[in-house]
């Protein structure tokens, strides 16, 4: 059974070896690269856990008219994607990102 979360330590790890190499996460990979989230997180000293959404989940949201990234602004898209990243500040403290709009 594959785990549904990822710990990020380098750009190569997140994009090539884990998320983008797994077809289940192709939509998530495309979006985090389109909005430069990989570069943003790697430019800061964060320890992250990522809960990537599968392409099937993105398709289901769109098919059921729950969420369509094509209809969102850049800021709205980033806001939604950031909820899939958790920053570990200390061993027992976890924060989610809340972007400033």
Image (cartoon, helix red, strand yellow):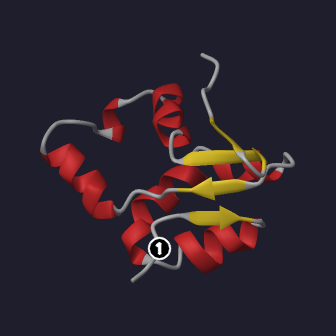
Instruction: Mark yes or no: residue 100 visible.
Output: yes
Residue at far front of view: 92
Where is residue 25 shown, x and y percent of the image?
A: 43, 66
Q: Horizontal placement of 45 versus 47: left or right?
A: right
Residue at far left of view: 64
Q: Is residue 14 above or below residue 69?
A: below
Instruction: Mark yes or no: residue 36 visible.
Output: no
Where is residue 11 shown, x and y percent of the image?
A: 74, 65
Q: How busy is the neighbourhood of tag 1: few (under 14 within 10 Å), some, or many (20 plus)?
A: few
Element under disc 1:
loop
Q: Is residue 67 above or below residue 26?
A: above
Write down the residue under mark 1. 3
Residue ID at (60%, 27%)? 98
Where is residue 99 shown, x and y percent of the image?
A: 62, 26
Where is residue 76 shown, x and y percent of the image?
A: 46, 27
Q: Horizontal placement of 43 versus 33: left or right?
A: right
Q: Quadrant of residue 17?
A: bottom right
- In the rendered view of the protein, which quadrant contains the N terminus? bottom left
Q: Which of the two residues, 78 or 86, is positioned nearer the viewer here?
A: 86
Q: Quadrant of residue 14?
A: bottom right
Q: Quadrant of residue 101?
A: top right
Q: Horizontal placement of 75 versus 70: left or right?
A: right
Q: Horizontal placement of 88 versus 17: left or right?
A: right
Residue ID at (47%, 58%)? 52
Q: Is residue 30 above or below residue 35?
A: below
Residue ID at (59%, 47%)? 85
């Amino acid at each position: 059974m594959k785990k549904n979360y990822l710990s990020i330590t380098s750009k190569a790890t997140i994009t090539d070896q884990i998320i983008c190499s797994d077809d289940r996460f192709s939509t998530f990979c495309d979006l985090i690269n389109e909005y430069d989230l990989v570069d943003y997180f790697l430019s800061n000293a964060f320890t992250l856990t990522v809960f990537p959404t599968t392409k099937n989940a993105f398709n289901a949201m769109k098919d059921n008219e729950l969420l369509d990234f094509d209809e969102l602004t850049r800021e709205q898209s980033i806001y939604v994607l950031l909820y899939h990243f958790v920053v570990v500040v200390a061993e027992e403290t976890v924060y989610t990102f809340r972007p400033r709009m």
